[in-house]
């Protein structure tokens, strides 16, 4: 595996590639990321991963400084998986001057994650656009744990006519249901024991919808209350339509199979997010 730090080296190493499949990450790789690399391998003859902890997508009181950085272990895993090129730029390479030009994402970026993390999707879209310009992939793979991110990046690619296929990959879970995430490392043993309840409660809402309930507001309120009662600080539990994550019709006119239940909540000092399809695999647009 080639490890490159600069845009110049990157283009040199990718010069002969016919079809580039790209997995952008912020490192601290776990099985969820590694599954993305396997999917990338099915889509390209050159697999490129990036590791860059993107300051632009962190708010002033968020965990940029303590975000786990485990580059040596990550390199070993990527080499073992046969990734062709790791692009691990330094901050000066990505932002040699203050990044005053930024992508303005759509109103969806102000909802859900964006409501709790103002500016988050401006930062994500800006760095993803820059990474896409540098790597010039044919395909890019994104995990569905960050469901809103998948939808917003796909919309950006469509509206800016970027010839890149966005491939969403299923969330990888621990045996107890907890979605794998680098932020799980922050959890204390007691919090780790509680954490799978986020998935369990979202899955419970999805199962109620599958059984025919369409009193979405009630379902959201009860799920939020159950999490709060268990000690979570809830940002949102939201039932949305797979198509652009719009709010479903309150009379239940939307096909239930296309709905998604998303949630974000804090346990101690750790904020976790997750989402489930009412019918697994059906909530993608
Ligand atoms: O999902 C992530 O890890 C990040 O948001 C991404 C896409 C690598 C952009 O920094």
Image (spheres, rainbow, N blue to C red):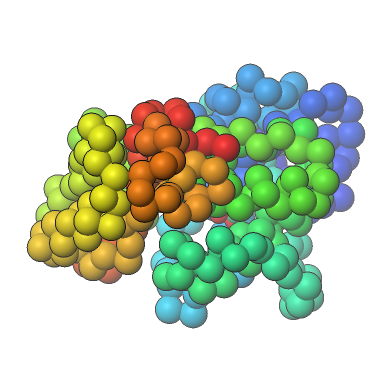
Q: Quadrant of residue 31?
A: top left
Relative horizontal placement of residue 39, taking residue 3 as reference (left or right): left
Looking at the image, which residue is at 81% across and 38% down? Answer: 163
Image coordinates of residue 151 in percent, x first then y, are: 58, 47
Q: In the rendered view, tell whether residue 140 sits above or below residue 153.
A: above
Looking at the image, which residue is at 76% across and 38% down? Answer: 164
Image coordinates of residue 35 in percent, x first then y, are: 49, 29
Q: Which of the two residues, 24 or 6, is positioned nearer the viewer here?
A: 24
Quadrant of the image for the C terminus?
A: top right
Quadrant of the image for the N terminus?
A: top right
Looking at the image, which residue is at 45% across and 54% down? Answer: 247
How many callouts does the rendering have? 0
Inspect this view and state whether residue 29 appears. Answer: no
Looking at the image, which residue is at 46% across and 45% down? Answer: 241
Q: Which of the two residues, 203 or 214, is positioned nearer the viewer here?
A: 214
Relative horizontal placement of residue 170, taking residue 51 as reference (left or right): left
Image coordinates of residue 199 in percent, x first then y, are: 26, 43
Q: Which of the two residues, 178 or 285, is positioned nearer the viewer here?
A: 285
Q: In the rendered view, tell whether residue 21 sits above or below residue 200.
A: above
Inspect this view and state whether residue 37 appears. Answer: yes
Q: In the rendered view, tell whether residue 20 sits above or below residue 107.
A: above
Image coordinates of residue 172 in percent, x first then y, are: 39, 34
């Amino acid at each position: 595996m080639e490890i490159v730090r600069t845009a110049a080296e990157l283009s040199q190493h990718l010069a002969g590639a016919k079809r580039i499949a790209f997995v952008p990450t912020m490192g601290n790789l776990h099985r969820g990321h590694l599954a993305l690399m396997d999917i990338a391998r099915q889509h390209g003859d050159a697999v490129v991963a990036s590791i860059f902890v993107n300051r632009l997508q962190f708010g002033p009181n968020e965990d940029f400084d303590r975000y786990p950085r485990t580059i040596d272990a990550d390199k070993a895993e990527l080499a073992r998986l046969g990734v062709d090129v790791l692009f691990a730029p330094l901050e000066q390479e990505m932002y040699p001057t203050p990044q005053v030009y930024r992508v303005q994402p759509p109103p969806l970026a102000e909802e859900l994650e964006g409501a709790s993390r103002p500016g988050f999707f401006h930062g994500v879209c800006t760095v993803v656009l820059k990474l896409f310009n540098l790597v010039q992939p044919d395909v890019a793979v994104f995990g569905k744990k960050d469901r809103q991110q998948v939808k917003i990046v796909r919309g950006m690619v469509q509206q800016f006519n970027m010839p890149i296929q966005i491939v969403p990959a299923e969330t990888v879970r621990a045996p107890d249901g907890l979605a794998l995430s680098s932020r799980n490392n922050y959890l204390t043993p007691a919090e780790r024991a509680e954490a799978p309840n986020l998935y369990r409660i979202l899955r419970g809402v999805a199962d109620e919808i599958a059984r025919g309930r369409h009193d979405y507001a009630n379902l959201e309120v009860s799920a939020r209350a159950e999490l709060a009662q268990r000690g979570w600080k809830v940002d949102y539990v939201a039932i949305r339509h797979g198509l652009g994550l719009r709010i479903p019709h309150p009379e239940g006119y939307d096909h239930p199979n296309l709905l998604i239940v998303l949630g974000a909540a804090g346990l101690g000092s750790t904020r976790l997010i997750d989402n489930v399809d009412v019918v697994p695999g059906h909530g993608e647009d």
